[in-house]
Image: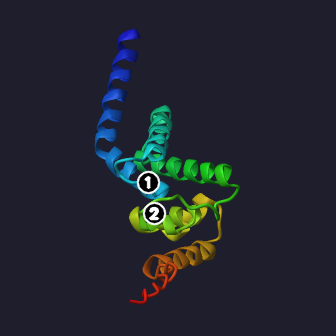
């Protein structure tokens, strides 16, 4: 009995290690896009990834044919949304101070853009995951894309007065 449990535990660990080896890089990149942190300084993204992988490992035996990447991505998205809600009071405010073009977007817009465009999640699945109507996801994605394609201009440069000679 003990040998069988040890064997199952070792198999589970090997399967999960193989999953992490193949998926962790992409999940970290998605988390970095969500947080709009620089790729070389992304502590929030790393915490999101760690949480998603821990949750996926805890659920590993119950996945039974479910895609573990999808499970981890869902957890990543929900944790990001939950953190943005509690940190800033809503998903619609507070943008990170970053040079990332995605920093122009609200957390909700970033979440939808990353899920839809980077991860390729269907509109309906994104809407279900976030508890929003499909039309709302479509409108938020369109607004976010408009912002990314036509970013707001900064203030006009100050006029410099010529010094009399």
Specify the farthest residue to the top.
Answer: 2
Q: Which residue is mark 2?
A: 114
Quadrant position of the C terminus in the picture: bottom left
The residue drawn where x is 32% and y is 26% is 11
Give whichever of discs 1 and 2 has the lower sequence position: 1
Q: Position of residue 7 (x, y in %)?
A: 33, 19
Where residue 59 appears, as percent x and y from the top left, is 50, 35
Image marks 1 and 2: residues in contact by CB distance under 8 Å: no
Q: Residue at x 45, y 47 (%)?
A: 45
Quarter containing the N terminus: top left
Q: Dot 1: what SS?
A: loop
* Residue tagged 1: 37
Give the number of the disc on residue 2: none
Residue at image point 67% right, 49% down: 86
Above or below residue 80? Residue 103 is below
Quarter occupied by residue 114: bottom left
Q: Residues within 10 Å of mark 1 (few under 14, many from 20)?
A: many
Mark 2 is surrounded, within 10 Å at the Cα level, by few (under 14), some (14 to 19) or many (20 or more) other residues, namely many
In what element is the residue under mark 2?
helix
Q: 28 and 120: which one is in front?
A: 28
Residue closer to the observer: 153 or 117: 153
Is 64 situated above or below 138? above
Q: Residue at x 65, y 61 (%)?
A: 131
Residue 131 or residue 117, whichever sits in front: 117
Image position, residue 73 (x, y; %): 46, 51
């Amino acid at each position: 009995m003990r040998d069988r449990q040890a064997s199952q535990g070792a198999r589970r660990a090997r399967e999960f290690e193989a999953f992490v080896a193949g998926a962790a890089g992409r999940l970290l990149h998605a988390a970095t896009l969500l947080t709009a942190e620089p790729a070389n300084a992304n502590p929030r993204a790393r915490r999101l990834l760690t949480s998603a992988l821990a949750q996926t490992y805890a659920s590993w035996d119950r996945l039974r044919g479910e895609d573990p990447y999808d499970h981890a991505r869902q957890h990543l998205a929900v944790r990001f949304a939950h953190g943005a809600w509690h940190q800033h009071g809503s998903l619609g405010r507070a943008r990170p101070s970053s040079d990332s073009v995605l920093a122009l977007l609200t957390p909700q817009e970033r979440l939808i853009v990353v899920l839809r465009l980077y991860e390729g999640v269907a509109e309906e699945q994104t809407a279900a995951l976030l508890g929003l109507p499909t039309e709302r996801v479509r409108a938020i994605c369109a607004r976010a894309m408009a912002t990314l394609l036509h970013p707001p201009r900064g203030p006009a440069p100050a006029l410099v007065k010529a010094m009399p000679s």
